[in-house]
Image: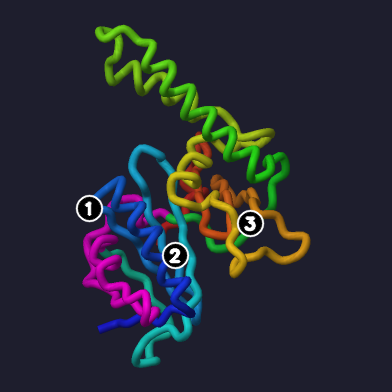
C-alpha cells in the first residue's frame, strides 16, 4: 500500500476540497498523480470546461516505506478522496485505473514564461460573474422552442471563448478556476511572497497556464501541432 504523507492538515483539507469539486462535475472522475520528493501534483479534467486543472500539495515525505523515488499513476478521484485522513494528513493511493485520453497529454514540465495583460484577481472574478449572468440572461430570453442544446452551446461558446483582459486565455479557464475554488481570497497561511501576484499567466509551447495560490488551470491554444504536446 502506498501512503502519501501530506505536509499538514491544511494540505489534506485543500486536496479533499479539490477532489470534491471535481466529483461534483463528474462522479466517475479520474485524476493523474505525479509525485517526486516532497511535491505532489494532481491533474483532473472537469467536463464542459475543456481545461486541465492542476492541484499541487506539499508532502512531509513521499511514501510510507521511503523506498520509492517517484509516483505516476491514474486513479479514481472518488477513491482517493475517501482515502484522505484529514486529521492524520495522509492519503492512500488507490489501485490504478485505465486513464481517460487527457491523462496521457499533460502540459510540459518546464519552459514556462510569464505573459502580460492578466487583470487583477478581483477583476477576473468580476469578469466570470458577468459572463455567468450574461449566459443566464440570454438563455432565459430564448423562446421555449428555441432553447435547443445547439443554441445553448452556441451562446456558451461565444461567451466562454472571449479573452481574459489582453491575453489569449479564454474566460472558460477563469470560470473553471472560480468553480474549483482557485480564485478565492488567500488565507493567512497561504500568503504570497512580497512582490508576487495572486494570479499569474504563463505560456509554454501551445499551453497557457493560469496559476493561483490554490491551483492552476491549463488550456491548449487552438491550432496545435504534434510538437506542442507533452505525452507522458
Q: Mark 2 and mark 3 in contact (Cβ < 8 Å)?
A: no
Query: Mark 1, mark 2: which one is toward the viewer?
Result: 2
193 relative to 227, above or below: below
Q: Position of residue 147 (x, y in %)?
A: 29, 14
141 relative to 67, above or below: above
Query: Mark 3, mark 2: which one is toward the viewer?
Result: 2
Q: Position of residue 4 (x, y in %)?
A: 37, 80
Query: Gap between marks 3 and 1, in whole Å?
Result: 31 Å
**Residue 92 belongs to magenta span:** yes
User: Circle 2 sits in a helix, a strand or a loop, which is it?
Assistant: helix
User: Circle 1 sits in a helix, a strand or a loop, which is it?
Assistant: loop
Query: Gap between marks 3 and 2, in whole Å?
Result: 25 Å
Q: Earlier in the sequence, mark 1 or mark 2?
A: 2
Residue at the image position 39 percent from the left and 19 percent from the top: 154
Tell me the residue that label 3 is attached to.
Answer: 112
Query: Which picture quadrant has residue 16?
Result: bottom left
Tell me the residue that label 1 is attached to.
Answer: 28
Name the one closer to the observer, 206 or 34: 34
Which residue, as the protein is rendered here, is positioned at the far right? 195
Instruction: Report the quarter where the N terminus lies.
Output: bottom left
Q: Which residues are magenta?
A: 76-105
Within 10 Å of disc 1 (Cα), the crowding (few <14, some 14-19, many 20+) is: few
Residue at the image position 30 percent from the left and 64 percent from the top: 74
**Residue 188 belongs to magenta span:** no
Tell me the residue that label 2 is attached to.
Answer: 14
Query: Mark 3, mark 1: which one is toward the viewer?
Result: 1
Query: Which picture quadrant has residue 167?
Result: top right
Amino acid at each position: 500500500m502506498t501512503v502519501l504523507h501530506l505536509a499538514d492538515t491544511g494540505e489534506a483539507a485543500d486536496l479533499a476540497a479539490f477532489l470534491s469539486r471535481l466529483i461534483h462535475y463528474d462522479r466517475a472522475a479520474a485524476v493523474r498523480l505525479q509525485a517526486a520528493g516532497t511535491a505532489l501534483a494532481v491533474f483532473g479534467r472537469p467536463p464542459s470546461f475543456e481545461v486541465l486543472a492542476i492541484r499541487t500539495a506539499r508532502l512531509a515525505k513521499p511514501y510510507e516505506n521511503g523506498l520509492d523515488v517517484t509516483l505516476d499513476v491514474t486513479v479514481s478521484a472518488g477513491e482517493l478522496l475517501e482515502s484522505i485522513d484529514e486529521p492524520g494528513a495522509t492519503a492512500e493511493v488507490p489501485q490504478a485505473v485505465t486513464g481517460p485520453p487527457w491523462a496521457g497529454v499533460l502540459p510540459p514540465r518546464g519552459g514556462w514564461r510569464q505573459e502580460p495583460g492578466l487583470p487583477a484577481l478581483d477583476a477576473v472574478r468580476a469578469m466570470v460573474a458577468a459572463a455567468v449572468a450574461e449566459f443566464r440572461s440570454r438563455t432565459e430570453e430564448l423562446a421555449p422552442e428555441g432553447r435547443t442544446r445547439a443554441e445553448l452551446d452556441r451562446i456558451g461558446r461565444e461567451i466562454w471563448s472571449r479573452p481574459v483582459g489582453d491575453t489569449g486565455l479564454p474566460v472558460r479557464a477563469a470560470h473553471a478556476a472560480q468553480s474549483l475554488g482557485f480564485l478565492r481570497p488567500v488565507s493567512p497561511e497561504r500568503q504570497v511572497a512580497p512582490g508576487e501576484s495572486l494570479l499569474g499567466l504563463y505560456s509554454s509551447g501551445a499551453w497557457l497556464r493560469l496559476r493561483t495560490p490554490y491551483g492552476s488551470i491549463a488550456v491548449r491554444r487552438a491550432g496545435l501541432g504534434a510538437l506542442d504536446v507533452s505525452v507522458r
